[in-house]
Image (cartoon, helix red, strand yellow):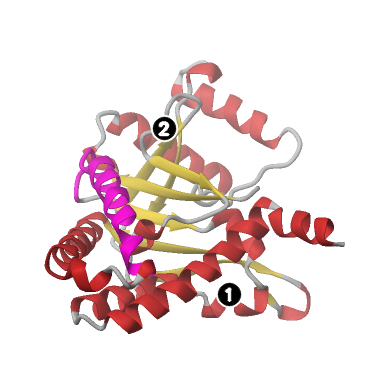
Amino acid sequence: MAQSVLMVYEHIESLNEFDYWKKYIGFYEKYWDGPATPQSSWWGQEYNNFRQSLSDHLGTETQHIKDCFFFKNEGGEYFVCPIGNSINLNILAIDNIIPLEWFILFHADEKKYFFTHTGFGAVHHDSIYYRSNLEKSMDRINKAEKLLINSFKIDEGNLKSYEYIIKLKEVVKGIFNIKDWLSGFSKEGMIILNYGEITNHIVQDSMKNENSVGEIWNILDNLEKRNFKEANSDLRHFNIKWSDISMNAAGLQNDMHTKLQ
């Protein structure tokens, strides 16, 4: 089982509890000498000691502390993704796959890596992530939705012979759901796609070449130009790639191998 996540980080000044998050972040950065990210880790009693110290600083009992992930951009502005045990409106998570419509939110140039430094100066790519301005992401997904709807409206008769393109009708539904979710946030926010544990099921040597965002936009570009054969072929290869990754993540390929022996 492997999980990927889509996370919205809101501009700290757009949050109702601005003063709370400002104090939280100020204390966190001094205590840990860095921001709180999904890659943050603690050992033994470290986290409990931190929360008690934070409780004293905020004048709030530990059980009432609200937590977040956060980062600071190049201009020194803070962006916050609240987290907690209650329903989390800022995070979408899914097991064993990354929905195609999530890739549409980003540009290939926005790809980044989480790194681990190993022995002899080697660098290990822990995970892939993309980060973009929410307004840009909304423009991209609106463009893709319009392109897909128009393609099916104008060329549905021609598209019937292209089985993989026809499947993109389901993606239009996914786009609608993503737009509905994002409509609850200010356009000043940032959005992050974190491959998370999915990267454990991508061959390490090929991680630099993993370019699903670029592949999807190339498919959409061909669809807009009505290069249906190319779009269908590329989408077929894309689906095969992610079917393999998903099966690996779910442990199904090992199960199939065992059954065949």
Q: Which residue is mark 2?
A: 88
Q: Amino acid at mark 1?
A: Met
What stretch of residues is rendered in magenta?
164-187
Q: Which residue of the protein is positioned furthest toward the right in this rendering? A: 261
**Residue on which disc 1 sits:** 207
Reply yes or no: does residue 113 show up in magenta.
Answer: no
Foreground residue among 53 and 93: 93
Q: Position of residue 249 (x, y in %)?
A: 65, 55
Which corner quadrant of the image does residue 157 belong to?
bottom left
Dot 2 lies on which element? Answer: loop
Query: Can you say whether 186 is above or below 169 in the image?
Result: above
From the image, give the main secondary structure of the stretch colored magenta.
Answer: helix
**Residue 213 or residue 127, whichever sits in front:** 213
Q: Is residue 147 left or right of residue 161?
A: left
Residue 73, horizontal then vertical, whole percent:
34, 59
Residue at left offset 81%, top offset 56%: 259
